[in-house]
């Protein structure tokens, strides 16, 4: 495990042979992955991998903020996504983080069904278009959309191949509304 490396949800931090899964991580098929944004730390005493949150100073969401969000349920006309980070502000978010991305706000092109563009647990870069009474998100711009996605069949990372994403493990192909920097997300731009 790379100590002090900054990771985003879904990044591999270790294996279950090396360490056990601690705070801010989860284990799947022998691989320990980050479940939040933060710094890799090893709890040497218990041989556990931990992701320490970047900082704990709370920040309030504002209209126009660019955020990272994790897709939750994908419905017929919207996606529910949990806002986990405001780009440029390494702080935790205070208050409500439950955002809504309506089907009309996904892309500049016509989208009939959100499930053709996003899947649960995708890491999405989105713009906040409204904060109150509810958090509304949009991903129409080219630099907005999925920055990281896992195969819905085997949960291994999906690699961009032309207009599609391909699983590095089972070769399943899937489609997403990806960003230009999909798979090459620059951690310095957090
Ligand atoms: Zn797969």
Image (spheres, helix red, strand yellow):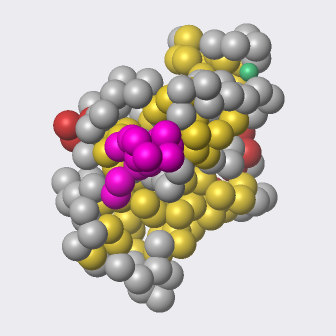
Count the marks. 0
Residue 60 position, x and y percent, is 28, 78
Residue toward you, 51 or 18: 18
Magenta run includes residue 83: no
Residue nearest the observer in this picture, 65 or 103: 65
74 or 36, nearer to the observer: 36
Q: Residue furthest bottom?
A: 133
Q: Is residue 94 above or below residue 140?
A: below
Q: Quadrant of ligand 1?
A: top right
- Residue 43 magenta-drawn? yes
Front residue of this view, candidates 55 and 61: 55
The answer to whether residue 116 is above or below residue 132 is above
Residue 153 placed where, x, y %? 80, 29
Q: Which residues are magenta?
A: 41-53
Q: Position of residue 25 (x, y in %)?
A: 53, 47
**Residue at 65% of width from left, 58% of height from top?**
72
The picture quadrant where one finds residue 66 is bottom left
Residue at the location (69% across, 36% down)? 28
């Amino acid at each position: 495990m790379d100590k002090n490396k900054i990771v985003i949800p879904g990044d591999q931090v270790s294996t279950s042979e090396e360490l056990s899964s601690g705070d801010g991580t989860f284990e799947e098929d022998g691989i320990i992955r980050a479940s939040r944004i933060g710094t890799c730390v090893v709890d040497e005493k218990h041989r556990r991998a931990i992701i320490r949150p970047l900082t704990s100073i709370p920040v309030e969401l504002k209209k126009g903020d660019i955020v990272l969000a994790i897709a939750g349920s994908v419905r017929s006309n919207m996606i529910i996504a949990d806002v986990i980070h405001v780009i440029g502000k390494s702080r935790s978010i205070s208050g409500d983080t439950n955002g809504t991305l309506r089907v009309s706000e996904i892309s500049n092109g016509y989208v009939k069904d959100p499930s053709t563009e996003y899947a649960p647990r995708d890491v999405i870069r989105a713009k906040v278009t409204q904060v109150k009474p509810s958090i509304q998100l949009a991903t129409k711009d080219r630099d907005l959309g999925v920055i990281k996605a896992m195969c819905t069949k085997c949960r291994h990372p999906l690699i961009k191949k032309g207009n599609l994403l391909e699983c590095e493990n089972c070769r399943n192909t899937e489609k997403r509304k990806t960003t230009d920097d999909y798979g090459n997300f620059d951690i310095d731009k957090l």
